[in-house]
Image (cartoon, rainbow, N blue to C red):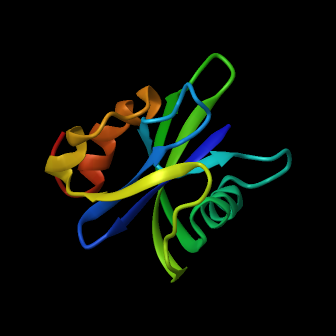
């Protein structure tokens, strides 16, 4: 399982552009990563955001799940930064805050793109 954080601040969501691996470079995603064996999804998401962006998030409601491959599913959770300042790490080369009407302005990973209607709804915009 893979978890992702829909980090919300001031009515916008954070998008992160992948810099690696090569087949994902240039695509945008909601930050997160794989859940380790025996790890709770919320705990995994806090760990992954800290590792990738050096900030601590508080995890809120789950938005749903979307297939990534035959092996993995993406589970997205609303989240907010509670400490630290978001900084780029090795996996991303750009961060952007996007309003609901700007979500289509970047090229999302297919699994993350599939979640955009739920993200819009979470921001208060009807599907």
Residue at image x 24%, y 48%? 120
Task: Name which residue lies at 32% across and 48% down.
Answer: 119
Point out the image quarter for the C terminus: top left
Instruction: State left or right for residue 4 relative to residue 26.
Output: right
Q: Position of residue 29 (x, y in %)?
A: 45, 43
Whether residue 42 sits left or right of residue 76 in the image: it is: right
Indicate the quadrant where residue 37 lies: top right
Residue 47 lies in what quarter of the image? bottom right
Question: In this rendering, is residue 18 above or below 60?
Answer: above
Image: 34 above or below 83: above
Residue 7 position (above or below residue 72): below
Residue positioned 24% across, 45% down in the render: 103
Between 97 and 5, which is closer to the camera in this rendering? 97
Residue 97: name its quadrant: bottom left
x and y percent of residue 105 in the render?
A: 21, 41
The image position of residue 1, as x and y in percent, is: 68, 37
Q: Nearer the viewer, residue 92 or 32?
A: 92
Q: Position of residue 106 (x, y in %)?
A: 28, 40
Residue shown at 62%/53% (left/top)?
90
Of the pair 19 and 7, the residue shown nearer to us: 19
Residue furthest bottom in the image? 83
Considering every residue shown, the one lying at the far top of the view is 70
Q: Count the labels in the image.
A: 0
């Amino acid at each position: 399982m893979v978890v992702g954080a829909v980090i919300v601040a001031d009515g916008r969501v954070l998008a992160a552009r992948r810099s690696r691996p090569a087949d994902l470079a240039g695509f945008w995603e909601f930050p997160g990563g794989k859940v380790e064996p025996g790890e709770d999804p919320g705990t995994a998401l806090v760990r992954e955001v800290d590792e990738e962006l050096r900030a601590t998030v508080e995890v809120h409601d789950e938005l749903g799940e979307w297939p990534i491959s035959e092996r993995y599913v993406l589970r997205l959770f609303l989240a907010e930064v509670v400490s630290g300042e978001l900084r780029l790490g090795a996996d991303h080369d750009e961060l952007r805050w996007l309003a609901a009407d700007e979500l289509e302005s970047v090229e999302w990973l297919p699994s993350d793109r599939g979640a955009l209607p739920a993200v819009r709804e979470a921001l208060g915009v009807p599907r």
